[in-house]
Image: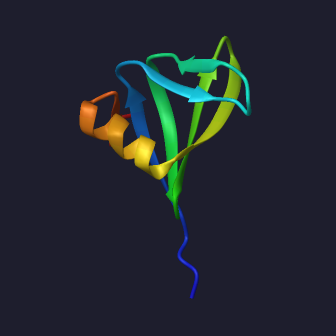
Amino acid sequence: MLSTPTQISGRIAASVEFRAGDGPLLTIPEGHCQVIVEGDSAVLTWTEEGQPLTTAIPKIEFDRFIASGAIILGTS
């Protein structure tokens, strides 16, 4: 049986960077986000300048952001 991914409210509290394809590192601005963790990746969704944006990051990087306090889960 496949598990259903859970969407969690969170907050970006410090620098969270990701790479879009082969491009430069981009920074998610501090503030509210939504997180879906499934398998070996986490999908983060946030709003920047009124536009919804989404990225997937490896679970190991996501865990590092959680451990450092850059991403705080369970906030609205």
Residue 60 percent location from the top left of the image = 42, 49
Quadrant hosting residue 48: top right
Residue 55 percent location from the top left of the image = 64, 37
Given residues 56 and 50, the one toward you in this image is: 56
Indicate whether 58 appears above or below 54.
below
**How many marks do you count on the picture?**
0
Indicate whether 68 appears above or below 5.
above
Quadrant hosting residue 47: top right
State how the image is colored: rainbow
Image point (63%, 29%), residue name: 19
Image point (52%, 51%), residue name: 36
Q: Can residue 73 be seen in this view?
A: no
Image point (51%, 24%), residue name: 17
- The quadrant of the picture occupied by the N terminus is bottom right
Q: Which residue lies furthest to the top in this view?
A: 49
Given residues 45 and 55, the one toward you in this image is: 55
Q: In this view, does 68 lie to the left or right of 45?
A: left
Q: Which residue lies furthest to the front in this view?
A: 22
Q: Can residue 23 be seen in this view?
A: yes
Quadrant hosting residue 11: top left
Residue 56 percent location from the top left of the image = 61, 43
- The quadrant of the picture occupied by the C terminus is top left
Image point (41%, 18%), residue name: 15
Indicate whether 32 appears above or below 49.
below
Q: Which residue lies furthest to the bottom in this view?
A: 1
Residue 12 percent location from the top left of the image = 41, 25
